[in-house]
Image (cartoon, rainbow, N blue to C red):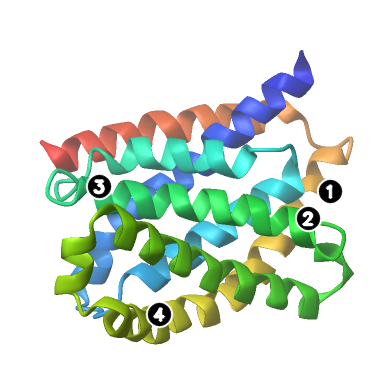
Amino acid sequence: MKKHLDKIIIVLLMGSIWGAFEVFGVELLKAIQVPHKSPFLFSFALMVMIASKRLNDFPGSAILIAAVALFYKSFSPDFQVCWATQTTAILTAGIVFEVGYRLFRNRIASGMLWRSLAAIVIGYGAYIALLSFDAVVNPEAFAACGGIAGMYGYLSSSGTYATILSVITINLGFYAGEKTKSMLNDQTYAFVPLATKALGLIVISIAWIAQLAY
């Protein structure tokens, strides 16, 4: 029972952190007039997901975390305007990360080089998957954005920026997850405080999002 509770709390906690950044991070990036926002959102999500895997790795956890983040994102004021794109982007990030992590699972802990390689594969993989999905589902919009040439331009700009940032964040997330895991395994720390913080973060995040949305 405790193992199942641990998994639920990790998913809710990490999904809440990702979701809160999807809402408030965008507002911050807008305020400082950052031209390419998706690389920061993706690389942050990657950091959250790799940390969650180090805390409690089970199949499909990244996808569940993405679903929680999407729930938070749905409260964002601009979600109604482009909900399809944002939904696809978040879920694609979770799915591609889950697949990529499985491919590199036995190498992730080997060293920074392998983690960096995983970040490159996952980063470009997620952007290619997202653009390919858009091309199939909405070919008219895809053509209006320049077709293959536009896809290559977006991939070489935002996709490359996201991958570079992800090389940094995947290592930060790995170390953060490992450090937190060691603290939880230490008899000095109890799991109850983490559960309390997780539930508290969820309540606070919902309140902040509701205030922002309404």
- Is residue 24 left or right of 118 when viewed as pictured? left
Which label was assigned to residue 178? 2
Label 1 belongs to which residue? Answer: 182
Which label was assigned to residue 155? 4
Mark nearest the camera among 2 and 4 is 4
- Is residue 74 left or right of 124 when viewed as pictured? left
Q: What residue do we see at 84% from left, 74% from top?
A: 111
- Is residue 26 left or right of 123 when viewed as pictured? left
Circles 2, 3 touching at the beta carbon (< 8 Å): no
Residue 23 appears anywhere in the view: no
Viewer-proximal residue among 163 and 169: 163
Circles 3, 4 touching at the beta carbon (< 8 Å): no
Could you tell me how far apart the alpha carbons at marks 1 and 3 are, in whole angstroms?
Answer: 39 Å
Could you tell me how far apart the alpha carbons at marks 2 and 3 are, in whole angstroms?
Answer: 35 Å
Mark nearest the camera among 2 and 3 is 3
- Chain-order first, disc 1 or disc 3: 3
Q: Residues within 10 Å of mark 2 (few under 14, many from 20)?
A: some
Q: Quadrant of the C terminus?
A: top left
Q: What residue do we see at 30% from left, 44% from top?
A: 73
- Is residue 192 left or right of 24 when viewed as pictured? right
